[in-house]
Amino acid sequence: MDKEELKEKIDKNTPGEDELNTQTTDNDITDQKSEDKDLDPEKKEDEKQTPEQELETLKDKLARTFAEMENQRRRFEKEREDAYEYGGYSFAKEALNLLDNLERSKVALENDEKLKDSDALKKIVEHLDIINNDMLSIFKKNNIEPIKSINEKLDPNLHQAMMEVEDETKEPGTIVQEIQKGFMMKDRLLRPSLVGVSKKKAKEVQEEGQKDEKNQ
C-alpha cells in the first residue's frame, strides 16, 4: 500500500467537521434533559402521584393548616384571658403604696408624745383605720388579698426574711414579725411579705454543737 492509498483510507475513517458538530449538539441536548430532570424532583413526583395520593397530600396540608389556626386561636384566648384577669396588676402594685403610707402615718401619730392618749389622736386613728379597711375591701373585690405571715413557716415564694429574732417558744423559721404586708392577686404574687423569723438562742445553738461533737 502506497502513501496515497493510506492517506485516502485515513480520511474515510476520520469524521468530518459537520459530523463532529452534530454529535456535540446531540450530546448537549441529552445532558440538558438529564439536568432538567434532576433539578425538579418534586415536579417529577407530582406527575407520578395518583389521584388518591394527591387527595391524601391535600388532606395532610389542610390538617396542618387547621392545626396552626387552632394554635393561634388558643394563644389569642390565653392572651385575652390574662389581659382580663391581670390587666390591673401594675395599678394594684402601685396602689399598695397607699396602704403603706396610711400605716406609716398611723404609727407616726401614735408615737407622737404630744398626741398620745388624746381624743384628737383617737379620732384620727379611727378615720385612718376606716380608710385602710375600705381599701382592703376594694382589693378583695378585685381578688387582691394579703398574705398570711404571722406564725406561718417561712415560704420563699411568699415571704422575704429581713431579720432573725431569738425566740425559744417558736420553731426555727417561724414568722414572728411582719415588717411589710405582702399581697397576692389571684395566683400571682404582687409583692412578698417582709418578715422576721424565729431562731434558737445562741447559747442553745452552742450547746447543741457541743453535744454533736461529743457524739462523734
Image (spheres, helix red, strand yellow):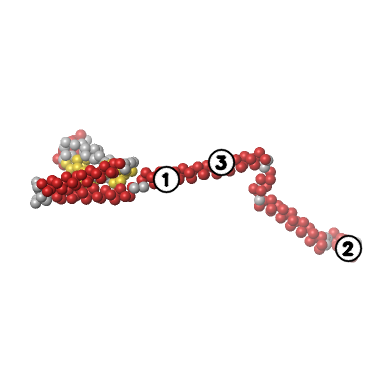
Residue under the image location 25 percent in, 45 percent down: 135
Determine whether the residue tagged by mark 1 lies in a helix, strand or loop. Answer: helix
Q: Which residue is mark 1?
A: 80
> Who is closer to the viewer here, 183 or 168?
183
Task: Tell which tag, 3 or 2, sits nearer the viewer.
Answer: 3
Q: Amino acid at mark 2?
A: Glu
Q: Which mark is residue 63?
A: 3
Q: Which mark is residue 8?
A: 2
Tell me whether circle 3 and circle 2 mark residues in contact (CB < 8 Å): no
The alpha-carbon separation of the residues under discs 2 and 1 comes to: 95 Å
Quadrant containing the C terminus is top left
Q: Earlier in the sequence, mark 1 or mark 3?
A: 3
Q: Is residue 19 left or right of residue 173?
A: right
The alpha-carbon separation of the residues under discs 3 and 2 comes to: 75 Å
Q: Percent from the top left, x then y, of residue 73?
A: 48, 44
Determine whether the residue tagged by mark 3 lies in a helix, strand or loop. Answer: helix
Q: Amino acid at mark 1?
A: Arg
The alpha-carbon separation of the residues under discs 1 and 3 comes to: 26 Å
